[in-house]
Amino acid sequence: MNRKITLNESDIPEKWYNIVADMPNKPLPPLNPKTRQPAGPDDLSPIFPMGLIEQEVSAEQYIEIPDEVREIYKIWRPTPMYRATGLEKMLDTPAKIYYKYEGVSPSGSHKPNTAVPQAYYNMKEGVKSITTETGAGQWGTALAFACSQFDMNCEVYMVRISYDQKPYRKVMMNTFGAEVYPSPSDRTEAGRRILEKTPDTSGSLGIAISEAIERAVSDDNTKYSLGSVLNHVLLHQTIIGQESIKQLEYAGDYPDIVIAPLGGGSNFAGISFPFLKNNLTDGKNTRFIAVEPASCPKLTRGKFMYDHGDSAGYTPLLPMYTLGHNFTPAAIHAGGLRYHGASVLCSQLLKDDLIEAVALQQLECFEAGVMFAKAEGIISAPEATHAVAQVIREANKAKEEGTEKTILFNLCGHGFVDMSAYEDYFAGKLSDHEIAEERLTENIKEIEELQPE
Amino acid sequence: MNRKITLNESDIPEKWYNIVADMPNKPLPPLNPKTRQPAGPDDLSPIFPMGLIEQEVSAEQYIEIPDEVREIYKIWRPTPMYRATGLEKMLDTPAKIYYKYEGVSPSGSHKPNTAVPQAYYNMKEGVKSITTETGAGQWGTALAFACSQFDMNCEVYMVRISYDQKPYRKVMMNTFGAEVYPSPSDRTEAGRRILEKTPDTSGSLGIAISEAIERAVSDDNTKYSLGSVLNHVLLHQTIIGQESIKQLEYAGDYPDIVIAPLGGGSNFAGISFPFLKNNLTDGKNTRFIAVEPASCPKLTRGKFMYDHGDSAGYTPLLPMYTLGHNFTPAAIHAGGLRYHGASVLCSQLLKDDLIEAVALQQLECFEAGVMFAKAEGIISAPEATHAVAQVIREANKAKEEGTEKTILFNLCGHGFVDMSAYEDYFAGKLSDHEIAEERLTENIKEIEELQPE
């Protein structure tokens, strides 16, 4: 039996799939935070190129992938799909487990799938430099790689505490030619203001976003880029699910359950949406499970409301499941899942019961990650272990019930640059996190004033 | 045009290729260090299983790969081959550049190609536990993974300074279930003796080998394992070259030059020997260039003599190009190339002018690594950058000469766990190394007494 299902370069999808076309309830519009009126392309054009704004607001079912983008995708795509024979044996389950592995990309996760087209559309419109923020550095690395492919400048504002404590991601960005600045920096008004007040601050993602956006707004040749949440980002990731459908066809199979971690939503959307299309338009009955950390439970304990996408309050108001943009999750190692809201598209789909959500504690996830490494030979990123843990739950349930379920999950990245997380786990330094209901209520109260009338 | 040439699992070779069968001058025998007589299987059986000893002394042209080993190879094999279109464009060279990428393995290098069969043959003979030494940790990680696949215990003696300063490789080994001890440890006579004299020692590879071998000799259920140098290790790596031949066939090409770094020799042998067979038996005329660091120049400045394979002097005497087993190279970041000798097979082939060697300085190699990351999207391990740098030299020469050379090289591992090396490079902390002729002469003088009469 094949363990790996590989495709040829000619199998790289030619179009991105836009689920908006098939959603029974279309997503609500984002709102201009000042006017509380629907935000249009003009609200976005100071920071994004028109090519991406058009995709952001598009209702077309498919959008063509430019040849230049597909050419760069060839560096790591199509990504392999695995039948998890080692894990199935270890769990002694009748379930058939498949996983799509995005860790083979230049930065080691699914992020370059959108970084490359984002850099491309900026380049096409004459943009010379792209700014972004990064926490632990996964997104910054992906964008640095993408910019290097188009000979563009890349300017990354990295939260100071990560810059100081996790230098290796910074070095990866440097290797791809990016400039990386600890945030707050003295390069922006926003940064200087904060440094003046609190010179020893460790920074935050909110501050870094402010700096990156300020740089983009104040320079005609510079735009800003986001690594998740927005519609066009989710759109770009749908190549994951499209390839997966073809690979499962080769294996003669189709998933009963699709599982992925959810931080902003792009990784979950990437593998799920092309299969969800078949639920919506072709009578299929797959279950889709988004896995979030119990320490940041927007899907399972948040509210569906209008909220800012960033903690600084710069972005349009987005209709989404949120914990409130001032919610600060515990410092878990799955940094990519520490986001207060879920993308508009994923939120609407959850509201309409078309997808499901579950929140898991981190100790269960690391235990699953260690099992997976021994069974399958791949050390997963802490974010990805959330999917693995839920897969183990479903596979054990299939064993109890004696059903031969087919489970597919997205192994969105490897853990080679996250070994300090496993070190802390083995040293017993990690713990689970409970969040008091009052704390959630307080944070939600703060955004009630943002709702339209 | 395809950037990537992928194969199916059915293309994983069914046999390892043993170049001894085709060598015009067979390698000289290893000698028992006490008797100075040819060492036979009995000299090796206390530390290696018979299945591997048979391969070590075999002159058969092909040796069948067990099904259980091929099943595990499927986790990452066949590995991809790339046409380096990005690098070719950057260099504006008429040369066609291909590379085989071994970084997709569980530990991120070519090492699991031999770790898996070594664990397998031990398991078949009832061995419960395998010991080994590791410096920076590449080999220990590969063996830890292999042992986890056969539910065997893996005991790694890691040089203390690496154990303390580079904890992430240790954590990777733990994740695959291995026990990792800083060496010298109090678990062996050899370790205790050294700790008593010098409790603050930072350890050495020589001490770690002593500890690992002592543990193997003193326990019937425990054997020892080596990650390079020996004939059976080189044999296992020949799957790299065999897959490469098939991939270049699909591309309609054949290499004029094959390039790989050489530490002990297994990576170089892996990609070269199957092509070298075609030189020896089929009239082909490919050049084979082994690249070593200028700080450890056994091939270009060492002597062909009998010497110990380890610095402690435990192993049989091997006929090889060596700098003397007491030679301590500068602390360059390409730890896998800091070995005093070259494998017996590579040494004999170099002596017979069937392969070539070149020594490069580390700054040129890191510069090449940074170019390669920008051009191809892969950050190379410091060892692998030695091949990249030589490829760039040959591609530039092809441009000067206006010849359309076909160059193939082995990109033996990624650099995700080596970012501190790039950090030092960007910070200007690295330098080139010159070795005075007198120092080489002195080290060689020390091993003259080991020569047979």
Image (cartoon, coloured by chain):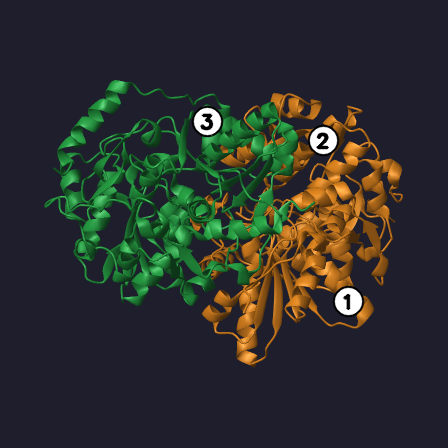
Chain colours: A orange, B green
- Name the quadrant containing residue B269: top left
Task: Evaluate if marks 2 and 3 touch, with contact meaning CB atoms under 8 Å apart.
Answer: no
Task: Looking at this view, name the residue that lies furthest to the left.
Answer: B35
Q: Residues within 10 Å of mark 2 (few under 14, many from 20)?
A: many
Residue A205 in the image: x percent, y percent? 64, 37
Residue A290: percent from left, percent from top = 65, 60
Please state the chain letter of the residue tagged with numbered disc 1 in the rendered image.
A
Circle 1 crowding by C-alpha within 10 Å: few under 14, some 14–19, many from 20 = some
Q: Which of B37/A394 is in front?
A: B37
Q: Quadrant of residue A345?
A: bottom right
Tags 2 and 3 both on a single chain: no
Q: CA distance from mark 2 to mark 3?
A: 26 Å
Could you tell me residue B196's position as x and y percent? 14, 38
User: Residue A278 — which label?
Assistant: 1
Along the horizontal axis of the image, is B316 left or right of B176? left
Q: Which of the 4 image quadrants contains residue B126?
A: bottom left
- The x, y position of residue B389, in whole percent, is 50, 30
* Residue type of the residue flagged with mark 2: Ile
